[in-house]
Image (cartoon, rainbow, N blue to C red):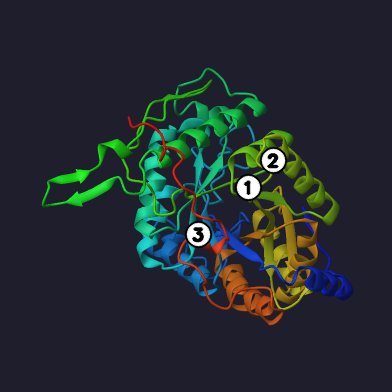
């Protein structure tokens, strides 16, 4: 685990001056009762409601009151485990999840502005199925859907499906995920925007000439298309992925609109951003916008000693120090604001914050951190767009097939 000291006043002031013209983007990653394994045992954690729609709707509503860009919903295709080799057999930690895409679809009608980013494991899912699920989410949310692509090399996940004798190498996993995203994007484009006529007088519901085969042939997929779902309101819902290795950097660079990297320190973040930008240039996509976010698990309190004491108490409940595998911040919302403004000078558009304890740290983000950022003039005071692409400043793309022969 790495905990950050408070950023210096001079450093945060210079960051504010140099980056104050650009808005800071913020998302929160939601998983169970929080990132810390003992989070479910905290007062207010509501462990009895973790598998209810009301719980997740309440979290999304709280995030929306803080004017956050998006919430992401974590997911996997195996039980959570502290072991890299498979199930750990522990009974003192949260085990089990609801399906992320279905949770996002349930939350969508109950929110109005915030983006919804369910995680999907490309390794064990079919792109045709995911394309229509996310297109449906975009229709249900009226243009606020995202898709967070992840891969899995865990043997126990592979054994749930029986499609492979063993896991793929890391580079191949990410190459397969890139093809997965390419198929999904082509399927989203396979209906032109005006393919639906819906003319009762003439009896024509659809213009068949505006549906297109995608005819994708690759190493991992062969998909003809077209989709069975009309083109999403955003045209292309926002695609995101996390990166902390060269193979994952390549996936972020080639296939996403939003990438997320660990924000351990300025030099490490700058190196990750540079690697992704170079990979983006190598694919010929340098002119296309790409948001890069820093990934931070946060434990927020009135001051740094109080936050550290709370984390120490949680560690005692868990029986070992927290080691979530990413960057960790303990301190006050003001100190976190200092750090975010300093760290984004490494080339970040914003941050994905992972509440250590959702019941405590999510409200601290929305009710304390956000007002502090607003006071500094770097965060919105009202939602300025109705779609996730709009919130992120991304144009709505035209269908790539609009000028091509019909299926």
Where 91 falls versus 374 (above or below)?
Answer: above
Q: Quick one: label 1 or label 3, which is nearer the N terminus?
A: 1
Residue 111 place in picture, x, y as percent:
41, 67
Q: Quick one: label 2 or label 3, which is nearer the N terminus?
A: 2
Where 213 falls versus 149 (above or below)?
Answer: above
**Residue 253 lies in what quarter of the image?**
top right
Numbered circle sitting on residue 288: 1
Q: Quick one: label 2 or label 1, which is nearer the N terminus?
A: 2
Residue 108 place in picture, x, y as percent:
39, 60
Kindly report the distance in space between the C-alpha atoms of the residues bearing marks 2 and 3: 22 Å
Q: Residue at x 45, y 66 (%)?
A: 386
Q: Nearer the viewer, residue 56 or 101?
A: 101
Kindly report the distance in space between the C-alpha atoms of the residues bearing marks 2 and 1: 9 Å
Q: Residue at x 63, y 51 (%)?
A: 289
Q: Quadrant of the C terminus?
A: top left
Query: Is any atom of residue 17 visible in this view?
Result: yes
Say if mark 2 contacts mark 1, CB within 8 Å. Answer: yes
Identify the secondary structure beneath mark 1. loop
Q: Residue at x 60, y 29 (%)?
A: 175
- Farthest top residue in view: 165
Identify the secondary structure beneath mark 2. helix
Say if mark 2 contacts mark 3, CB within 8 Å. Answer: no
Of badges 1 and 3, nearer the viewer stands: 1
Of badges 2 and 3, nearer the viewer stands: 2
Q: Name the residue carrying label 2.
A: 280
Residue 101 place in picture, x, y as percent:
42, 49
Q: Name the residue carrying label 3.
A: 388
């Amino acid at each position: 685990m790495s905990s950050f000291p408070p950023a210096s006043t001079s450093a945060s002031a210079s960051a504010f001056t140099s980056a104050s013209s650009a808005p800071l983007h913020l998302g929160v990653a939601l998983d169970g009762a929080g990132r810390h394994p003992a989070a479910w045992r905290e007062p207010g954690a509501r462990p009895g409601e973790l598998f209810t729609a009301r719980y997740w709707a309440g979290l999304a509503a709280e995030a929306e009151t803080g004017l956050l860009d998006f919430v992401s919903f974590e997911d996997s295709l195996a039980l959570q485990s502290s072991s890299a080799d498979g199930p750990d057999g522990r009974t003192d930690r949260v085990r089990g999840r609801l399906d992320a895409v279905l949770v996002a679809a349930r939350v969508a009608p109950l929110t109005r502005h915030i983006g919804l980013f369910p995680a999907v494991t490309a390794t064990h899912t079919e792109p045709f199925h995911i394309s229509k699920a996310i297109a449906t989410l975009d229709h249900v949310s009226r243009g606020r859907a995202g898709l967070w692509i992840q891969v899995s090399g865990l043997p126990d996940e592979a054994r749930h499906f029986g499609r492979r004798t063993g896991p793929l190498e890391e580079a191949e996993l990410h190459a397969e995920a890139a093809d997965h995203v390419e198929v999904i994007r082509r399927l989203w484009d396979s209906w032109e925007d005006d393919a639906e006529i819906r003319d009762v007088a003439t009896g024509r519901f659809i213009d068949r000439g505006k549906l297109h085969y995608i005819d994708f042939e690759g190493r991992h997929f062969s998909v003809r298309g077209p989709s069975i779902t009309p083109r999403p309101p955003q045209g292309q819902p926002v695609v995101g992925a996390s990166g902390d290795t060269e193979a994952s950097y390549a996936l972020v660079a080639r296939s996403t609109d939003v990438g997320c990297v660990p924000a351990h320190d300025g030099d490490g973040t700058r190196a990750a951003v540079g690697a992704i930008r170079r990979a983006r240039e190598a694919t010929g996509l340098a002119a296309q916008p790409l948001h890069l976010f820093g990934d931070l698990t946060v434990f927020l309190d009135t001051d740094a000693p109080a936050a550290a004491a709370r984390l120490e108490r949680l560690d005692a409940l868990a029986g070992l120090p927290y080691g979530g595998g990413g960057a960790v911040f303990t301190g006050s919302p003001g100190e976190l604001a200092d750090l975010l403004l300093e760290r984004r000078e490494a080339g970040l558009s914003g941050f994905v914050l992972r509440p250590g304890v959702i019941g405590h740290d999510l409200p601290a983000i929305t009710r304390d951190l956000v007002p502090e950022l607003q006071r500094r003039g770097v965060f919105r005071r009202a939602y300025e767009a109705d779609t996730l692409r709009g919130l992120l400043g991304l144009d709505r793309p035209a269908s790539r097939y609009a000028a091509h022969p019909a299926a």
